[in-house]
């Protein structure tokens, strides 16, 4: 290799390192725009990390009295909680625990993403593709959340790459870690079977190790999990039932991310995906290209999440980087193959790079402004709810079970007021599995469709205290009922006491 080639390689690698540093800088600058945690689930994850510090691994979750977790708890996000755990020894300020946890997750993710992309395209192209992902505000928003989805994405990318390269030990390790990180670890086994089916159909080959080792990793992770065998039930409930009931619209009040949005919003917020799909389609149609098995498998894998994304907003976070990886493999087959290995050094390529960079420079501020607005909205909500939770900690007797007119209150309350108990957290599916009848009563109360709120709070839920919002249907049931006493209010949130109820 001559000096000119060495210099070119150094510059190219430096650009990729700069892209990684720039990505982390964007995440840091965005999360520090807020004084609070910028998610809801982050409060729950910090609380569980603190509980592990105080009690060890939990077998039951007493903070949810009307949930299957009360007796059969499984820490479905164990790896995230172990990552956060050391931070709880460094500071008691939950906003700092959240922010540093998010930074650690993003360092892991972007390092892994760059490593895999670099296997398919030159560093400069990989750098551009990493930054292009930020044009999706959905993608950027998820990267700011202290949630296990970032770990799931990281391990999915590594798993798909190892399937392509037949790295059986990599698959074993990745699937094992995945099983401790997220309930969707079974997807690696699914993709392993799909990979070998496609390989057999296209190439007449079948790599059985690509299936055996992910299965072994998955089983090992299940068994060594501190909540085995309860974790099997959680995988079934959270990994399958939640998605099924959300898609079938069974009436459970899931978070908005579980449902789809308008076609226009879907397109505009994830435009990079459609640009990649359009590029691959037209290039293959016009030039009659033959692409590699690796590209076919990665495109097919990304399309699985694309279909899910059409049904549920939460999956677009996965679609963006997986379609980027598929595009990188496609470019390896076309622009960077042996027949055209010097493409990235031609005038045409430099012109294309310039256009893309200018597009990023124009579009990125618009995308980040949308993210910034989301952060401001979340900050206002979180500060208000934190105030309520802190007041309840100081004024409601320890050991009381508190009614809440939305399950989304409980991450805040469990984190900031763990001396009281609540009904359900994270997803209503856990209350539904505990008792469909109680879940139906609870949901009718929250929407204002159950007329006798006093009877159910006193007899069904056995609560003397509760929290609601003046915008919730439940508030309309109690605002003029003299059997309820409002004892605190803050920015639309109401804390009340059920009168005439004595233990």
Image (cartoon, rainbow, N blue to C red):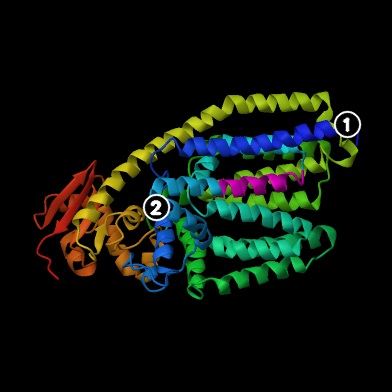
Residue 232's spot in the image, x, y percent? 52, 72
Span shown in magenta? 105-120
Residue 330's spot in the image, x, y percent? 76, 43
Residue 246's spot in the image, x, y percent? 46, 56
Asked whether 114 falls inside the magenta stretch, the response is: yes
> Is 413 above or below relative to 367?
below
> For numbered disc 1, what is the local secondary structure?
helix
> Circle 1 is placed at which residue position?
3
Instruction: Pick the residue in front: 146 or 344.
Output: 146
Near mark 1 (Cα within 10 A), the count class, few <14, some 14-19 or many ≥20, is: few
Type of secondary structure dominating the magenta stretch: helix
What residue is drawn where x is 85% and y is 41%? 337
> Circle 2 is placed at which residue position?
43
Looking at the image, the residue that sits furthest to the front is: 90
Instruction: Pick the residue in front: 404 or 49.
Output: 49
> Is 250 above or below relative to 368?
below
Asked whether 274 falls inside the magenta stretch, the response is: no
Residue 28's spot in the image, x, y percent? 51, 38
What residue is drawn where x is 81% and y is 43%? 333
> For numbered disc 2, what is the local secondary structure?
helix
Instruction: Pick the residue in front: 453 or 21.
Output: 21
> Residues under labels 1 and 2: Cα distance?
53 Å
**For the N terminus, which image quadrant?**
top right
């Amino acid at each position: 290799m001559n000096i000119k080639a060495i210099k070119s390689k150094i510059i190219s690698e430096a650009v990729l390192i700069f892209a990684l540093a720039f990505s982390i800088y964007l995440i840091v600058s965005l999360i520090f725009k807020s004084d609070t945690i910028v998610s809801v689930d982050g409060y729950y994850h910090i609380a569980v990390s603190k509980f592990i510090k105080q009690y060890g691994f939990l077998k039951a979750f007493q903070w949810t009295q009307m949930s299957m977790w009360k007796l059969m708890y499984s820490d479905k996000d164990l790896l995230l909680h172990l990552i956060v755990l050391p931070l709880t020894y460094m500071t008691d300020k939950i906003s700092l625990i959240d922010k540093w946890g998010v930074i650690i997750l993003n360092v892991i993710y972007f390092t892994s993403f760059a490593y895999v992309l670099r296997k398919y395209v030159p560093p400069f192209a990989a750098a551009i593709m990493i930054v292009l992902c930020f044009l999706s505000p959905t993608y950027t928003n998820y990267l700011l959340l202290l949630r296990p989805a970032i770990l799931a994405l990281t391990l999915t990318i590594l798993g798909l790459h190892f399937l392509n390269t037949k790295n059986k030990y990599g698959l074993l390790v990745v699937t094992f870690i995945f099983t401790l990180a997220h309930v969707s670890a079974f997807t690696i086994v699914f993709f392993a079977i799909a990979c070998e089916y496609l390989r057999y159909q296209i190439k007449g080959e079948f790599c059985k190790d690509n299936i055996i080792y992910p299965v072994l990793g998955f089983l090992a992770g299940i068994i060594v999990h501190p909540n085995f065998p309860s974790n099997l039930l959680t995988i079934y409930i959270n990994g399958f039932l939640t998605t099924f009931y959300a898609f079938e619209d069974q009436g459970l009040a899931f978070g908005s991310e579980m449902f789809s949005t308008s076609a226009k919003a879907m397109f505009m917020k994830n435009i990079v995906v459609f640009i990649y799909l359009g590029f691959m389609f037209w290039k293959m149609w016009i030039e009659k290209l033959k692409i590699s098995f690796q590209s076919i498998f990665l495109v097919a894998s990304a399309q699985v999440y694309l279909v899910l994304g059409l049904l549920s907003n939460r999956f677009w976070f996965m679609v963006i980087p997986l379609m980027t990886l598929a595009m990188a493999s496609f470019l390896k087959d076309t622009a960077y193959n042996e027949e055209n290995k010097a493409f990235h050094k031609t005038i045409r390529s430099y012109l294309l790079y310039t256009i893309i960079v200018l597009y990023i420079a124009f579009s990125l501020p618009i995308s980040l402004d949308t993210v910034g607005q989301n952060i401001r909205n979340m900050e206002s909500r979180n500060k208000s709810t934190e105030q309520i939770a802190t007041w309840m900690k100081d004024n409601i007797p320890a050991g009381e079970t508190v009614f809440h007119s939305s399950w989304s209150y409980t991450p805040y309350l469990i984190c900031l007021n763990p001396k009281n108990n609540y009904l359900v957290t994270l997803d209503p599916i856990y209350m539904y599995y505990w008792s469909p009848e109680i879940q139906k009563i609870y949901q009718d109360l929250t929407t204002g469709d159950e007329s006798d709120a006093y009877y159910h709070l006193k007899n069904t839920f056995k609560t003397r205290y509760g929290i609601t919002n003046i915008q919730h249907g439940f508030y309309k049931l109690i605002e003029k009922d003299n059997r309820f006493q409002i004892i605190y209010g803050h920015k639309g949130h109401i804390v009340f006491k059920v009168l005439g109820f004595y233990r």
